Image (cartoon, rainbow, N blue to C red):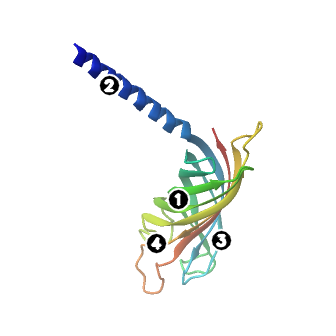
Amino acid sequence: MKKLLLIGLVLAMAQVSFAQGLGGIFQRLSFGLKAGGNYSNFTGANFDTEGLAGFNGGLLVNFKLTDKWSVQEEFLYSTQGAKITDNVFGTHKDLRLSYMSVPILVKYRSAIGLYAEVGAQANLLIKDAKNTGFVDFADKIDAGAVAGLGYEFTKGPAKGLGLGARYYQGFMDVGKFNSTTLKSDFKNSVAQLSIFYMF
């Protein structure tokens, strides 16, 4: 009987500790929404390009490590690419690529709400560029580094609202096509300006 009571007590204490542990984890988690504009281009292309306007939007998950440090993961829909300024693809056109982007960032926020962030980002191609003359213009996977600055309100009725600027530089070759005249080893580069709200 004493053994059963002891086992029951140990299990009850373990359950309480587990619940408190989960509670501590959930207290450190916050979620948010963001949307904004992109200005993208290809770097290292052997054909002439100009910047292309696009947009980004999606969900944020932030895990607080300390009062100033956190890790943030995002799940974004992002349109990017470049404008072609010569007739290398038969005409002047926009080469627009749509990605599901997942940045993972280490974030430092000051007491007044200014923050800096740096990390890595993976992109999964959702929609390829059309009318390029190639069946597959872009590779399905892209990855690179990302860094940004911004401000988030920490007090008052606007608490959780923020504005961020970010730059992404791809490290992987974008092009998947084979061509004797065009190189496929150009990279994605994207400047982003976004508004967000953390709940």
Dot 2: what SS?
helix
Front position in the image: 69 or 148? 69
* Three-letter amino acid code at the position of disc 4: Met
Q: Is residue 191 left or right of residue 21?
A: right
Q: Nearer the viewer, mark 1 or mark 2?
A: 2
* Three-letter amino acid code at the position of disc 1: Ser
Q: Which of marks 3 and 1 is nearer the N terminus?
A: 3
Question: Residue at point 51% right, 58% down?
Answer: 99
Residue 98 is tagged as: 1
CB under 8 Å between discs 2 and 3: no
Dot 4: what SS?
loop
For the C terminus, the quadrant is: top right
67 above or below 96? Answer: above
Classed neighbour count for the residue bearing mark 1: other residues with Cα under 10 Å, few (<14), some (14–19), many (≥20): many
- Label 2 sits on residue: 10
- Label 3 sits on residue: 51
Q: Distance between the residues labelled 3 and 4?
A: 19 Å
152 above or below 178? Answer: above
Q: How far apart are marks 4 and 1 (CA)?
A: 16 Å
Q: Distance between the residues labelled 4 and 2?
A: 53 Å
Question: Residue at point 51% right, 61% down?
Answer: 121
- Label 4 sits on residue: 172
- Counting from the top left corner in percent of width and height, residue 35 is at 64, 50
CB under 8 Å between discs 1 and 2: no
